[in-house]
Amino acid sequence: MSSPMKPTALVLAYILIAVRIGPGLMKHRAPYNLKYILTIYNIFQMIFNSYLFIKVWNEMQAIRSLMISNCQIDRTDEKLLECLSFGWLYLINKVVDLFDTIFMILRKKNDQITFLHVYHHSIMIYLTWFGIKYMGVREEYGIVITINTAIHVIMYFYYLVAAMGPQYQKYLRWKIYITKIQIGQFLVTPLYIFASVVKGCQMPKTYTFWVTIHACIFILLFVDFYRKAYKKSSGIEHRKNMAKKCEKST
């Protein structure tokens, strides 16, 4: 946490590996079978995110902060340090999330390493680091962490089932709902900030601008992904079904 150069170096190394080095090394190699590694990794992520969700949920007082005059929850120094430790663990989890990309590279799933994927993993490290370093303990962060960790528990459970083999993948028809929830989470924090501003809470202008801009970027990118991944596939399925009906009718 001492210098922004550390997360910057990490993110630059990640982008270089994800875009150039990783795919280049795997170009002439067969994809690895990581079934057991992915199973352990997904279970770990579910436990890690569940722990953070419970801890932050029990401490967060987002509604109460809007009910008091100064919008600030009084916490002891020990409690503030504990809350910051949860934020630091959340940052570490964002670093661990980078293994998602490493596993994609090793399995030669390069089509999944999209701009949205790389941007999302990269910017979350920056957003979390700057939030902990310069903004301290705020209820807005509690909202972000609780929603995001809850979604990640569901998401890594989905990945866990997918990693168990084709015989279980037939049950994975609810990925579209995960994407919808992901889009929804990016609306919650700006709405809470708006409510805080209307209430008259003192909100740092730089922080408000930073969060709002990136929330809008995430919404646009995820909506575009949703449109390409689900609307297009549903259209293809519809055309296939119509073709089958035509064949039967003839």
Image (tube, rainbow, N blue to C red):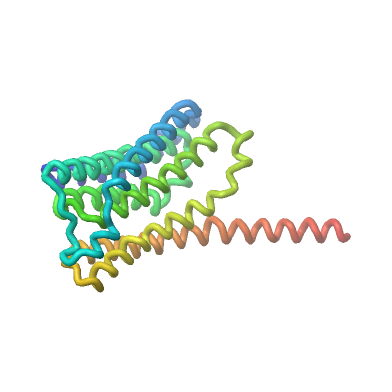
Give the image location of residue 155, x and y in percent.
Answer: 46, 44
Q: What residue do we see at 54% from left, 37% from top?
A: 162
Above or below residue 35? Residue 60 is: below
Q: In the displayed structure, does residue 238 sit left or right of residue 17?
A: right
Above or below residue 179? Residue 37 is: above
The quadrant of the picture occupied by the N terminus is top left
Q: What residue do we see at 53% from left, 53% from top?
A: 176
Give the image location of residue 12, x and y in percent.
Answer: 25, 45
Residue 24 visible here: no
Give the image location of residue 84, x and y in percent.
Answer: 19, 44
Q: In the displayed structure, does residue 152 sit left or right of residue 205?
A: right
Give the image location of residue 130, x and y in percent.
Answer: 19, 52
The quadrant of the picture occupied by the C terminus is bottom right
Residue nearest the observer in this picture, 34 or 46: 46
Q: What residue do we see at 31% from left, 53% from top?
A: 144
The picture quadrant where one finds residue 47 is top left
Above or below residue 221? Residue 164 is: above
Which residue reaches farthest top? Answer: 36
Residue nearest the observer in this picture, 178 or 223: 178
